[in-house]
Image (spheres, coloured by chain):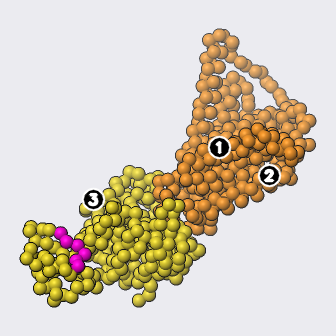
Chain colours: A yellow, B orange
Amino acid sequence: MTAVVTATGLTKRYKTSLALDSASFQIESGRIVGLIGPNGAGKTTALKAILGLTTFDGQLSVLGLDPRKERDKLMEQVCFIADVAVLPRWLKVGDAVDFVANTHPRFDRAKCDAFLARTKLQRGQKVKQLSKGMIVQLHLALVMSIDAKLLILDEPTLGLDILYRKQFYQSLLEDYFDEEKTILVTTHQVEEIEHILTDLMFIRDGKIVLDTDMDSLGERFAEVLVGSDMAAAARELKPLDERQVFGKSIFLFDNVSRPQLERLGEVRRPSISDLFVATMKGTYA
Amino acid sequence: MKTFYWLVKREFWEHKGGFFWAPVVTGIVFLALNFMGIVLGEVFGRRNNWGVFKYGEMSFRPEDMNNVGAMVDISLYAIAGVVLCVTAIVVFFYCLGALYDDRRDRSVLFWKSLPLSDTSTVLSKVASAALLAPAIAVVIGVIVGLAMSFLFTVVASMHGVGLWSLLIAAHPIRVVLTMILLIPLYAIWALPTIGWLLLCSSWARSKPFLWAIALPVGAGVIVSWFGLMGFAGLSSEWFWKNVVGRLLGSLAPGGWVGNASPLSGVGHDDPASLMNSMDLAYHYSALASPSLWIGAAAGAAMIAGAIWFRRWRDDS
């Protein structure tokens, strides 16, 4: 596997705050990576740095290119959707397809027409006449018809209803993703992408606090349902988090051996959202 | 080149209202006003029993025909000039918004997701402002002018005046050609204003209009106040005319006329020789004036600045 993105000591300082604090990470090709963090943690800044939309300190190589210097070349291989509302409102559906078809060397027009045929979009409609869900269908049709190596999604389903959200990720998986492609996605709706991710990164205060693939996530973290009699014993193992449900306690452990945990109670794999809440405790305090 | 063509096309899609419909509507309003004026004249004429004008056989001497033709040419220029003025106003605001509006509504993130270089994006906007918009205005202006002459001819022939022969003495094709050929000169002359507005549009985080107006006017006021230019042997009028005026007013059509060679413009009593003296060579003699070239160089530098800011300013 080759690295699509390699960041070393990525730092971005705004006038009053540090958006990225020496973040280092690597994204391999053929992965679907979730970059998850609370508001203001530096997610969007990290994506902007990768896309060459902002200056930064440190080292960053995307597909072997420096996004600051070689952005024009980079954008032939990289695509992004930065939330739903960025298609210009005056643009017509047909004009949008014509424009991208004539300016993007890796655009496949037949593919795009096929995607659009599955929707209610018509060539003559302007973006401002479309609902949010239809705008994202159009944007997704355009982007999925581009044979890009890296696709970056920044809150792509914000404000969409659940039908469009499900459809969005389903299309991505079924019609777009393959082992040649890499997807980097940020979202707050963690539950919805949990099952499609291959890798997970947590970012907090500009630092990468967790960087793991989903398989080792299940090995490393465990959630244990503990009766009140064993709770004290469980607390001695230094759980990350503890919450109460129906008179029992649920503990979240990091790197505690399985047999040890199984003695306490029922062990299961934690959901990303529970893991997230536990990791980010005290962020806004 | 293909990408550039599509970029310009994109500008036209977005600004069809300003680039195309604004001059068309101006022309229609212009024609309608003149038509109403003619009808009003006819009605008054009949009501007050001025009688119907009837001219007998009139014969024009060849030099008169020449002058009448030149008059029609001048009115064609004037009408196209009116349309061009409207386009100039449209282009002024187009330039102010060209690199700002898409940052405000965040659609810049969509354009930046495509492999389009910032240089060609900005240059496509320069081309739209300096070449495309004036070309559309010239064509529409001349069509309106011809419709206008046609209207007058019809009215005149209703009164028994054969103006068809007069109309034939005009040179609409020469007018169109002259105006088309003047567009490159217009573009060079307008560069400082286009560059300045694009620079503000690209640089301002908010209210580009305010910055674009306030900075040069403020500088002008300060210069006048302190009489700073007095030290350099130049008056503050010089600053207003050559800095403030060129930064904000160079889109006005024919702005270079004061800078063209003054010799050929004087001493003509009749329209035909005036028309002959105002030919392409006269206009292009403005190429010899330093104001034109210094302005163009400054404009190019400001466009380069706009490209740089386009690269690094984002939607925040």
Check chain identity for marks 2 and 3: say if they share one.
no
C-beta proximity under 8 Å, tags 2 and 3: no
Query: Callout 1, which amino acid?
Result: Ala
Percent across and percent down for residue B312 are: 57, 64
Same chain letter for marks 3 and 1? no
Q: B31 or B241, which is in the foreground?
A: B241
**Left or right: residue B115 compared with residue A118:** right
Read off the chain for label 2: B
Q: For marks 2 and 3, give the CA distance.
A: 58 Å
**Which residue is labeled 3 in the image?**
A161
**Looking at the picture, how far across and down is residue A191, in whole percent?**
25, 69
Which image quadrant: the N terminus of chain B?
Answer: bottom right
Residue depicted at 51% across the width and 56% down the height: B103
- The residue type indicated by label 3 comes to Asp
Looking at the rendering, the stretch of residues picked out in magenta corresponds to A238-243
Q: For mark 1, what is the residue? A: B214
In the rendered image, the vertical position of residue A49 relative to residue B253, given as above or below: below
Residue A212 position, x and y percent, is: 33, 81
Q: Determine whether B221 is above or below A201 in the image.
A: above
Secondary structure category for the residue under label 1: helix
Q: Of the numbered discs in the image, which one, if any, rests on residue B292?
A: 2
Image height of B27 relative to B194, above or below: above
Q: Please name whichever residue, B255 or A255, is drawn nearer the observer in this view of the structure.
A: A255
Tell me the quarter of the picture where residue A117 sits. Answer: bottom left
Q: Alpha carbon of mark 1 to alpha carbon of mark 2: how far?
A: 24 Å
Residue drawn at point x = 84 percent, y = 30 percent: B60
Left or right, residue A144 beside residue B305: left
In percent of the image, x 40 and y 68: which residue is there? Answer: A205
